[in-house]
Image (spheres, rainbow, N blue to C red):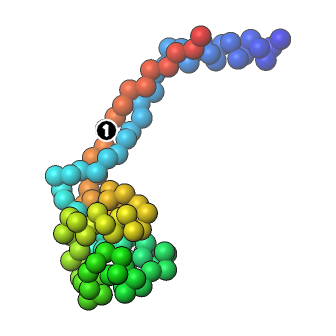
Amino acid sequence: MMKDMEILRIREILKRVDYIATLEEPDKLKGLDMEATKQRVCDLIKTKGLKDKDIAEQLGITPQAVNKWRHKGTFFVIENLYALSGLLGVSVDELLVPRGYKKMNVLIETSYC
């Protein structure tokens, strides 16, 4: 009985309390961190166990072009990036690393029946 009363008391308090959550999203105005993006792509290629020759054959480009992606980060032709994301099984957004994030505070209203 005492435990039930305590639960009811807590629920009554929570009915009156709202929460603020902080969310982060990429700040598109700050651009991309090219070095971090290159590293992410290299890590994904390594994780998948793909070789430059295999990637080149799948995408219809030369192994030298793939080598440039991995060492110079020069893969930002949109078609290449899109095709590479498909080959690695991730979205284009997962390949790209933004330079910064913007934070937003969101009010979450609680209600109990």
- Binning the other alpha carbons within 10 Å of mark 1 as few (below 14), some (14 to 19) or many (20 upward) gives few
Q: Residue furthest right?
A: 1
Q: Residue at x 39, y 68 (%)?
A: 87
Along the line of sight, the residue nearer the viewer: 68 or 58: 58
Secondary structure beneath label 1: strand
The reply, left or right, for residue 57 in relation to residue 76 is right
The image quadrant that residue 36 belongs to is: bottom left
Q: Is residue 34 among the parts visible in the rendering?
A: no
38 w.r.t. 64: above or below: above
Q: Is residue 64 among the parts visible in the rendering?
A: yes
Where's residue 50, x and y in %?
A: 44, 80
Along the line of sight, the residue nearer the viewer: 47 or 32: 47
71 w.r.t. 37: above or below: below
112 w.r.t. 84: above or below: above
- Check the picture and name the quadrant holding the C terminus: top right
Where's residue 46, x and y in %?
A: 45, 79
Q: Residue at x 83, y 11 (%)?
A: 1
Q: Amino acid at mark 1?
A: Met
The image quadrant that residue 84 belongs to is: bottom left
The image quadrant that residue 43 belongs to is: bottom left
The reply, left or right, for residue 111 in relation to residue 108 is right
Q: Residue furthest left?
A: 29
Q: Which residue is mark 1?
A: 104
The reply, left or right, for residue 57 in relation to residue 65 is right
Where's residue 64, x and y in %?
A: 26, 89
Q: Residue at x 50, y 19 (%)?
A: 110
Along the line of sight, the residue nearer the viewer: 84 or 94: 84
Q: Residue at x 21, y 69 (%)?
A: 76
